[in-house]
Amino acid sequence: MADSLPAGTVVNYGGIVDANSRPVLEQQGWLPCDGTSYPVTQYADLYAAIGAAHGATVDGQGQVMAFNVPDLQGRFVRGVNGAAMTTTGPVDPSAGSRFPAASNGNSKQRRIDGAGCNHQAGNAVRH
């Protein structure tokens, strides 16, 4: 499936991301969306798709040497609505009605029909 998706595609991932699973995910074409910096030369297709939108390392001549993948830990992924932009970024109409991320790592608390529950969740970006 990963080969049929363009670089920069972000998907939800329900597995555990740790030192053992990271190389397997990378080999399968995915990088965890945890804000990690990667060399432009190693991930040229991904850099072409997302650029330095999530941070970058620049050398003395202004050349981007490394770029960051998005850090979506504890974030709820939403689509872009260009009409709902402000000078500081997109408008989030339901920001006040959500629970914050749980303090125990990758688990999130969310409200469903008045009851709180925990879910393992994560996001990965296609490289």
Image (cartoon, rainbow, N blue to C red):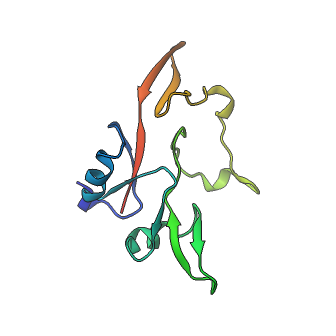
Q: Is residue 34 above or below residue 62?
A: above
Closest to the observer, 18 or 13 = 18
For residue 13, which quarter of the picture? top left
Residue 120 position within the rendered picture, expressed as x and y whole percent measured from the top left: 40, 30
The answer to whether 85 appears left or right of 42 in the picture is right
Residue 121 position within the rendered picture, expressed as x and y whole percent measured from the top left: 41, 35
In this figure, what is the number of numbered marks?
Answer: 0
The answer to whether 76 appears left or right of 8 in the picture is right
Closest to the observer, 84 or 112 = 112
Q: Is residue 6 above or below residue 24?
A: below
Residue 88 position within the rendered picture, expressed as x and y whole percent measured from the top left: 74, 54
* Quadrant including the N terminus: bottom left
Q: Residue at x 34, y 63 (%)?
A: 6
Closest to the observer, 124 or 91 = 124
The answer to whether 53 appears left or right of 4 in the picture is right
The answer to whether 115 appears left or right of 93 in the picture is left
Q: Residue at x 29, y 45 (%)?
A: 20
Closest to the observer, 45 or 16 = 16
Q: Is residue 127 above or below residue 108?
A: below
* Quadrant including the C terminus: bottom left
Q: Residue at x 25, y 61 (%)?
A: 4
Residue placed farthest to the front in the image? Answer: 19
Residue placed farthest to the bottom in the image? Answer: 61
